[in-house]
Image (cartoon, rainbow, N blue to C red):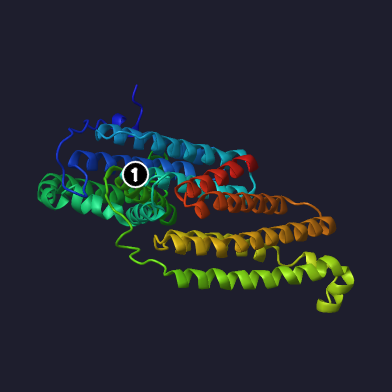
Amino acid sequence: MDTSIESMAGLPRAQVGPRTRGALAPTDARAVAVVALLLGVAGDALLRDGPPGAAFPLWIAALVLNLRALVNRSGRPLTREAGLWLAAAVVFALGIAWRDSEALIGLDLLATASALGMAAVVLGRPEAGLLAPRLQDTLAVAVRVVASVAGGAISLVLRDLHLEHARDRISVRSTPILRSIAIAAVLLLVFGSLLRGADPIFASFVALPNIDPGIVMSHIVLTGFLAWITAGWARASLVPTTETADETVPFQFAPRDAMTALGTLDVLFAAFVLAQLGWLFGGDAYLRARTGLTAAEYARRGFFEMVWVVALAVPILVATRSRLTDEIGARRRHTAFALPLVALLGAIILSAAFRLKLYVDYYGLTTDRLYAVALMAWLAIVIVWLVATVLRDHGRAFVAGAVLSGLAMLGVLN
């Protein structure tokens, strides 16, 4: 039994046929518009108090089920990867009802939004999924999805629904009805108010609605916002694309540029690690002589800065490798500069771990520090995976492994 919103709304199934390039067929566009509006109303009823709780996963599940129905009625297949991303969105949305940690709620929201975005990417261009030959093409389609979420509702209304052609017909049919409703409403409001004031008995039978304009406006804004992003996301999922990154990223790194970047980081990170060795072997006396800080004060500083260093160095390694020329010698030189950098990043991770251990010894273990340990462990996994893939010219598997390991770590935290 089909319980999707678009089915219950009585929308006819689409007839598969030719359509304008980059646009939805009119029947699909109408279905998207109805689904978006009804999901906006449902979201307003469920989410007015914020995402935490069972309401958010219920709304995400309704969103996923109706996208699947829209895909089916458009005659397009729902690929396995797209289905897995939609399922992941529901799973991480459930995490928001499962845990009340603000950090986990934020991460679960990010994972849910990212999974929905990747589902739209895969539906728009199946070959641009997680195992795409080129990460740049996935990013290019992802940018298109984000743009559609932001403004796709405009294209849906002005282009796909062909409202510029139907406007006159709608006006002819609706204007007399709307005029009659307006006349009746004004008369009821004015004379009803007067008669209520004239007779308490009549007033006891007739109560005018107590309308707060602020509350009404908040309902309209939330409903409109949810309907807007739903329409843009669904449109991006249903409109096929052949977009690639060849136009958006037209450059490549010259070998000298890549080696300069990696060489600079090698020298800088080596100097940092050597400075850490002085404290490791010199102890508290060396620390106080150099900085004037006690070990407890020192432990409170620098952990998150070191985590950011590792997190930013990884994309630099990936970017310089992916946009490098195909010359074998250039890639060998890149590996020669990258391996010491990876080793130094490992040393920085160990230093951060030791710093966090001191912090916990002095101030105790909290959930935020537990999340920091998990983040550091994931970064260590990512670096090892980078060596096994990117530096061996198997970059296609790197992104998939990094993303899946991150989602697995978030699942463990939940």
For the N terminus, the image quarter is: top left
Along the viewing direction, whichever of 158 and 113 lies nearer the viewer: 113
Task: Tell me where residue 375 appears, x and y as whole percent.
Answer: 64, 52
- Which quadrant holds residue 42? top left
Please tell me whether residue 2 is drawn above or below residue 137 in the rendered image: above
Task: Tell me where residue 276 appears, x and y as whole percent.
Answer: 76, 68
Along the viewing direction, whichever of 143 and 391 lies nearer the viewer: 391
Three-letter amino acid code at the position of disc 1: Glu
Task: Tell me where residue 81 appears, x and y as whole percent.
Answer: 41, 37
Tell me if 84 is positioned left or right of 36 in this view.
Answer: right
Image point (59%, 40%), residue name: 411
Please tell me whether residue 381 is drawn above or below residue 320 in the rendered image: above
For the C terminus, the image quarter is: top right
Task: Tell me where residue 236 appears, x and y as whole percent.
Answer: 31, 48
Image point (44%, 48%), residue name: 396
Tell me if 315 is positioned left or right of 276 in this view.
Answer: left
- Residue farthest toward the front in the current orientation of the protein: 329
Residue 234 seen in the current view: no
Residue 255 seen in the current view: yes
Image point (44%, 53%), residue name: 215
Along the viewing direction, whichever of 75 and 233 lies nearer the viewer: 75
Dot 1 alpha-carbon crowd within 10 angstroms: few under 14, some 14 to 19, many 20 or more:
some
Residue under label 1: 127
Image point (24%, 35%), residue name: 74
Question: What secondary structure is marked by label 1?
Answer: helix
Please tell me whether residue 23 is drawn above or below residue 340 in the rendered image: above
- Residue farthest toward the top in the current orientation of the protein: 1
